[in-house]
Amino acid sequence: MEISYINEIMEKGRLIHRGAEAILYLVDFLGTKAILKLRTSKKYRNKELDNLLRRRRTAREANILYHLYKNNFPAPKLYYVNLERNAIIMEYLEGLVLKEYINKLENSDELYKIGYDIGKLVAHLHNLNVIHNDLATRNFIVTKEKRIYLIDFGLSMFSHEYKEKALDIDVFKRVLDVTHPDECDMIFDTFIQVYTKNALDSKETINFYYKLSKMGRYHIRGG
């Protein structure tokens, strides 16, 4: 597919998000609803360096999405990638972001299920040696069938290091603390239990996570 095709579906599509690193459009891709992600240039960077970085990050994200698809991980399917345009076309997932979904829940059993499902999901992700690097509640989609998908792999990377996995967990906990302070403990306690049972190197990862969390509390208390 030519760059002209990317431009054509972009013009016919609808802008749904403009972020620091990329712009997202809801588009029609061969008769199917899809997301077109375009990595934007940074004017403050050298042009050649900017092109190189965007191309590398686009390729890495596409590789991760394909790796996840091959291993039956719940993430958007990769449809198409164009490195010249720094463009990725991927599956459009219809549902609520986790942040909104939690706000609609009415009982503790549903909170337990959220913690259980995300614990299994993140363990699966880490067993595939993928680090998300932004496990915020806005990056989980809950479908009408109540299946949870992880989205936005723009900051993701391959790594088998337990310290990187612990950082993923730390981000998830910190976001929950801010967005859902009342529900955080039940969701996260269940998450930790399920992650520990399912992640391959959970002992090292969880131990390092607790070290990180203690450091965080120390810095907060110390101002």
Image (cartoon, rainbow, N blue to C red):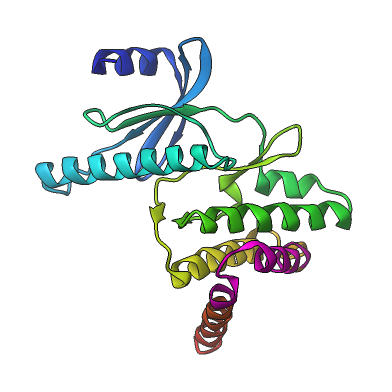
Q: Is residue 70 above or below residue 127?
A: above
Whether residue 72 sits left or right of residue 195 in the image: it is left
What is the magenta range?
A: 186-206
Question: In x, y percent, where is residue 183?
Answer: 77, 62
Whether residue 139 sits left or right of residue 51 in the image: it is right
Question: In x, y percent, where is residue 44?
Answer: 17, 49
Determine which quarter of the picture holds residue 116.
Answer: bottom right
Determine which quarter of the picture holds residue 182.
Answer: bottom right
Q: Quadrant of the N terminus?
A: top left
Residue at 59% over, 30% down: 93
Nearest the camera: 27 or 127? 127
Whether residue 220 sits left or right of residue 5 in the image: it is right
Q: Is residue 152 above or below residue 163?
A: above
Residue at 71% over, 52% down: 117
Question: In x, y percent, where is residue 159?
Answer: 40, 61
Question: In x, y percent, where is residue 66?
Answer: 43, 37
Nearest the camera: 153 or 46? 153
Nearest the camera: 42 or 84? 84
Q: Is residue 1 above or below residue 144?
A: above
Whether residue 135 sits left or right of residue 141 in the image: it is left
Residue at 46% over, 57% down: 129
Residue at 67% over, 46% down: 98
Magenta stretch encompasses residue 42: no
Q: Is residue 50 above or below residue 114?
A: above
